Image: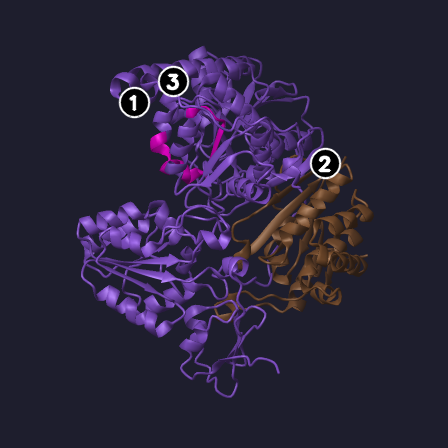
Chain colours: A purple, B brown
């Protein structure tokens, strides 16, 4: 049995923030969950998927990996409007994809509790930007709660279902990486009863958003805001800690840094902290009283100055003249490093305990002796250790073949997945990337505007997520480029989640498999070819023909991700070795593809037999045919 | 109560996150307040993996530069890479067996000799424990048990508010059955190497 399915409450368990969110949903009797995976949110859906698979008789919820976040939110909206408790999870940039349904779902509301998780990623540990999704609460008008750690994440998730039903509105819960990926003791309460099915009650005046209906629904939304604000004023998640004439207002994980700093500075009797958890609507009356009770206020919030601007506006409106400080407007940190302490609050990157302590000390004139740092002058330089495509990764072979054919001159729009690592030398086949699906659509723009040769890359999951509409556009508007679909049969980057193109039999799911080639042909692409990337010569020939084709051509490069294959279709291939007598040290194998299983010794290439999985790419590159399989024993 | 901030660093595949998670579980079992933090996403792709275990009163899940009491490194140059985490009173425990990244293989970077790395650590810090943990993992008949060796070394070198019995019980019950005995042996070998 999994600890997350413990029926009773009472005990504490060490949980990852994302597992705590799952437990919170289960304690609330969640019946329906949809998602698109993405760091740092992925362990929420992955845990729901795993539990359902491992304990089909114990779990009572429906769960799906949806094709993208917009689809996930719309599917969830249908379930919640029908009257079952629903969770929908995504990473911060996923909310951009789901923004269209989000704005109007806020108007129509829900008929049972619905919680939307947005997992933000300050400092961009695994994302293309660090946007602050607290703005989405303000943009949509939906209430938002922000936990400071796993225990609160569990409690708030449960509470958000209640709140959602009280208001008849979806509720957003916003986390950051340090909440999703922290572990702490989480106290359990008992699992909730699950209402698995319901009946859709027709009510076009609420659910069909023609203008005449939506005008009224907007007023409904504004009334919900007022109602939610009254609840926020009383919420135990908006709590004042300590006493003193110096004030701090904070929220999310930064609240922990503040509490630790106040302790470290020995200022518990001087500093009063307003820790906000129910952050939209803000408890304005309570904040106004707080502002009046102190001599100076520091706002501690990561990313955008959202609280700061709201508090300053409130002070102005209420005629409160207390000094309010936070971010230093216009000041930008000198370096883009993670846990550095630039000595002031800016709009870039996550905060950390030391930075918060330093700024609090400086703002309020408090003393603290920092630990004695050591000088790193003269330190041997550690070699860079960027993440790299795995040994035997089929993307490496596809990149090699494409580069052989199209060289450095072609423009390579790319997309989001493991294969984005193709940006690194020696592959260097990534020239443009802004979001999921941008490879396909931007290719049309680049080739039209420049006439240059364009070859773009997209993974199979990303293609289903948002490549299809771009490809239809390209065919319809007669663009001219080659799209390579890197079909490794799974969503590799985020942890091997299924998607519509996955061979569902292999993983034992009862979902339906949608093969890529007929789909792409059905979209009207005139030149479609499927290749096996480890058959280098044939792959190169097929790529050459596809690139020579005038118009939109698609190459589907099909080979399972080796990490995924190890689980679903294990094979044992013979590993390769370099024959020392034959190797003349050209090192093409290393210089052109940089497989992590290879290294140089005495000017010759060598293969680490523990890492090699026998993909045979290097053997086909070697001009001396010096790379051969290790002979079977006996 | 005082706070102990322990940072683990290693390379994807070395089992760093399992080590910090098990230490967290042991802390909870021992009735200690604990926060663990991890960086996910690139772990299987050969990048640097970092995690932190914070024991005591603190509620922050991360450790700022200069504030780690102990840095446990699974690889010698990774100890250097995270040296800005420590201060002059900190303890560094490092495995000395190199795991050169592919940037070295393609000639884009050079790999400092492990002795040179350890010599630098010793020049800067009074408390350094450096040993070939990988050979102890091999001695324990599970080359993947370096994480248990390093966890053992942490217990051997540092006075933690968790007793060794509790830690070993967690290792026995929370790691894969067929590796449990080798993992406990690896822990013991690491403990002895650092005690």
Give the answer, above or below, for where B153 lies relative to A608. Answer: above
Give the answer, above or below, for where A535 lies relative to B42. Answer: below
> Magenta segment: does it hold A95?
yes
Tag 1's secondary structure? loop
Residue B148 place in picture, x, y as percent? 72, 56
Tag 3's secondary structure? helix
Residue under label 1: A209
> Magenta segment: does it hold A323?
no
Instruction: State the image quarter where residue A92 is shown.
Output: top left
Residue A189 place in picture, x, y as percent? 66, 27
Instruction: State the image quarter where residue A191 is shown.
Output: top right
Q: CA distance from mark 2 to mark 1?
A: 51 Å
- At horizontal 60% and vertical 41% (from top left) the residue drawn is A55
Q: Which mark is residue A334?
A: none
Q: Foreground mark, 3 or 2?
A: 3
Rendered-image quadrant of the N terminus of chain A: top right
Residue under label 3: A221
- At horizontal 51% and vertical 39% (from top left) the residue drawn is A350
Q: Nearer the viewer, residue A126 or B108?
A: A126
Q: Foreground mark, 2 or 1?
A: 1
Give the answer, above or below, for where A576 lies relative to A417. Answer: below
Q: CA distance from mark 3 to mark 1?
A: 13 Å
Tag 2's secondary structure? loop
Disc 3 crowd, CA 10 A, few/some/many (<14, 14-19, 20+): many
Disc 1 crowd, CA 10 A, few/some/many (<14, 14-19, 20+): some
Letter of the chain that mark 2 sits on in the rendering: B
Q: Which residues are magenta?
A: A82-101
Residue B179 place in picture, x, y as percent? 71, 58
Q: Nearer the viewer, residue A341 or A84?
A: A84
Tell me if I can see residue A37 in this picture.
yes
Residue under label 2: B33
Q: Earlier in the sequence, mark 3 or mark 1?
A: 1
């Amino acid at each position: 049995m999994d600890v997350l399915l413990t029926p009773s409450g009472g005990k504490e368990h060490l949980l990852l923030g994302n597992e705590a969110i799952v437990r919170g949903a289960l304690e609330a009797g969640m019946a329906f969950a949809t998602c698109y995976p993405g760091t740092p949110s992925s362990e929420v859906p992955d845990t729901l998927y795993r539990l359902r698979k491992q304990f089909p008789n114990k779990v009572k919820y429906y769960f799906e990996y949806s094709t993208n976040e917009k689809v996930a939110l719309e599917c969830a909206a249908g379930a919640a409007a029908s009257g079952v408790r629903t969770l929908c999870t995504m990473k911060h940039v996923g909310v951009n994809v789901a923004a269209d349904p989000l704005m109007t779902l806020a108007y129509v509301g829900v008929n049972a509790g619905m919680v939307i998780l947005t997992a933000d990623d300050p400092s961009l540990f695994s994302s293309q930007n660090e946007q602050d999704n607290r703005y989405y609460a303000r943009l949509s008008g939906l209430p938002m709660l922000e936990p400071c750690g796993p225990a609160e994440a569990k409690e708030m998730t449960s509470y958000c279902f209640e709140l959602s039903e009280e208001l008849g509105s979806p509720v957003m819960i916003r986390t950051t990486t340090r909440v999703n990926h922290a572990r702490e003791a989480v106290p359990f309460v008992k699992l909730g009863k699950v209402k698995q099915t319901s009946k859709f009650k027709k009510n076009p005046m609420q659910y069909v958003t023609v203008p005449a209906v939506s005008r009224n629904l907007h007023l409904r939304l504004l009334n919900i805001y007022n109602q939610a604000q009254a609840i926020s004023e009383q919420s135990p998640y908006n709590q004042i800690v300590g006493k003193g004439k110096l004030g701090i207002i904070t929220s999310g994980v930064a609240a922990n840094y503040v509490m630790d700093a106040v302790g470290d500075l020995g200022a518990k009797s001087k500093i009063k902290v307003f820790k906000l958890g129910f952050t939209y609507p803000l408890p304005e009356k309570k904040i106004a009283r707080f502002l009046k009770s102190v001599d100076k206020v520091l706002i501690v919030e990561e990313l955008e100055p959202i609280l700061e601007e709201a508090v300053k506006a409130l002070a102005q409106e209420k005629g409160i003249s207390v000094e309010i400080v936070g971010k230093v407007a216009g000041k930008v940190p000198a370096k883009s490093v993670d846990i550095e302490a630039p000595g002031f609050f800016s709009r870039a990157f996550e905060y950390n305990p030391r930075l918060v302590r330093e700024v609090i000390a400086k703002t309020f004139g408090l003393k603290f002796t920092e630990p004695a740092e050591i000088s790193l002058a003269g330190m041997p330089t550690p070699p860079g250790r960027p993440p790299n495509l795995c040994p035997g990764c089929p993307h490496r072979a596809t990149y090699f073949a494409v580069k052989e054919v199209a060289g450095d001159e072609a423009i390579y729009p790319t997309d989001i997945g493991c294969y984005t690592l193709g940006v690194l030398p020696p592959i260097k086949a990534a020239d443009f990337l802004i979001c999921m699906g941008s490879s396909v659509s931007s290719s049309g723009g680049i080739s039209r505007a420049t006439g240059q040769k364009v070859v773009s890359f997209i993974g199979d999951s990303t293609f289903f997520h948002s490549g299809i509409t771009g490809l239809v556009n390209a065919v319809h508007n007669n663009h001219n480029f080659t799209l390579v679909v890197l079909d490794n049969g799974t969503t590799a980057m985020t942890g091997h989640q299924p998607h519509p193109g996955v061979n569902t039999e292999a993983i034992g799911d009862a979902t339906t498999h949608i093969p890529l080639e007929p789909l792409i042909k059905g979209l009207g692409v005139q030149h479609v070819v499927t290749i096996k990337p480890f058959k280098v010569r044939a792959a190169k020939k097929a790529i050459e023909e596809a690139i020579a084709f005038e118009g939109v051509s698609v190459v589907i490069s099909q080979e399972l991700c080796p990490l995924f294959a190890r689980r679903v279709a294990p094979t044992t291939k013979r590993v390769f070795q370099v024959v020392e007598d034959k190797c003349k040290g050209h090192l093409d194998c290393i210089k052109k593809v940089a497989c992590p299983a290879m290294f140089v010794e005495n000017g010759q290439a060598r293969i680490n037999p523990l890492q090699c999985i026998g993909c045979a790419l290097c053997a086909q590159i070697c001009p001396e045919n010096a790379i051969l399989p290790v002979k079977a024993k006996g | 109560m005082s706070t102990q901030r322990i940072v683990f660093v290693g390379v994807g595949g070395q089992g760093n996150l399992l080590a910090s998670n098990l230490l967290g579980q042991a802390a909870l079992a021992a009735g200690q307040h604990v926060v663990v933090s991890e960086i996910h996403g690139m772990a299987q792709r050969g990048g640097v993996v970092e995690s932190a275990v914070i024991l005591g009163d603190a509620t922050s899940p991360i450790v700022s530069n200069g504030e780690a009491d102990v840095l446990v490194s699974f690889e010698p140059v990774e100890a250097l890479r995270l040296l800005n985490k420590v201060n002059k009173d900190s303890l560094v425990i490092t495995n000395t067996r190199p795991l050169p990244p592919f940037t070295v293989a393609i000639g884009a970077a050079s790999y400092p000799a492990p002795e040179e790395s350890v010599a630098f650590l010793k020049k800067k810090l009074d408390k350094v424990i450096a040993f070939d943990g990988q050979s102890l993992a091999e001695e324990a008949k599970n080359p993947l048990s370096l994480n248990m060796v390093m966890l053992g070394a942490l217990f051997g070198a540092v006075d933690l508010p968790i007793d060794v019995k509790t830690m070993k019980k967690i290792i026995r019950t929370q790691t894969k059955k067929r590796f449990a005995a080798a993992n406990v042996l690896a822990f013991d070998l690491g403990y002895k190497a650092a005690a």
